[in-house]
């Protein structure tokens, strides 16, 4: 009911659900367990949820049944492939929100002032830059 009031008031309500498959979840969890740099991503709640896959899936189904409405529908995104999921989410949001092109003045850079000119790179010699890896 609250969602209907919000939508009727002109609010664009977008409800997204990122759906990860059972095999992909296990693959991600195992990768985190095996990689000490990524272990912090695996919380006690994550490991507990792993054993309760079907409980969480039933709760998800009940939530959809109770809250998927004509005025505020859920949109599910298959997210086994994170990159594609992100692109699909961005694409969906951009298609969902109406917009008008904003007319902008053409930008023109002014000429640089040479007043006070000096070799600004020479003063950086001997300082410690971060290693350029990319």
Image: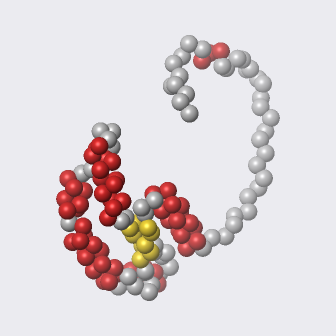
Rendered-image quadrant of the C terminus: top right
Q: Is residue 41 visible?
A: no
- Asked whether 124 or 46 is in front, the reply is 46
Q: Where's residue 122, x and y in %?
A: 65, 15
Residue 38 position in % (x across, y down) = 33, 43
Q: Give coordinates of residue 50: x percent, y percent.
A: 23, 60
Quadrant of the rendered image containing residue 2: bottom left
Q: Position of residue 107 (x, y in %)?
A: 76, 49
Q: Is 10 located above or below residue 101 in the figure?
A: below
Closest to the observer: 14 or 64? 64
Front one among 64 and 7: 64
Q: Quadrant of the N terminus?
A: bottom left
Left or right relative to 34: residue 126? right
Tally the marks.
0
Q: Is residue 96 above or below residue 20?
A: below
Judged left or right of residue 36, residue 113 is right
Q: Residue at 76% of width from left, 23% of height from top?
A: 115
């Amino acid at each position: 009911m609250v969602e209907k009031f919000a939508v009727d008031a002109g609010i664009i309500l977008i409800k997204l659900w990122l759906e990860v498959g059972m095999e992909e979840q296990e693959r991600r969890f195992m990768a985190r367990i095996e990689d000490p740099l990524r272990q912090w991503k695996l919380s006690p709640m994550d490991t507990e949820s792993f054993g309760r896959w079907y409980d969480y899936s039933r709760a998800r189904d009940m939530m959809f049944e109770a809250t998927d409405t004509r005025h505020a529908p859920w949109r599910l995104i298959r997210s086994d492939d994170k990159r594609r999921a992100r692109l699909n989410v961005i694409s969906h949001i951009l298609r969902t929100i109406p917009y008008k092109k904003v007319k902008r003045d053409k930008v023109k850079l002014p000429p640089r002032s040479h007043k006070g000119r000096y070799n600004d790179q020479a003063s950086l010699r001997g300082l410690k830059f971060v290693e350029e890896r990319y």
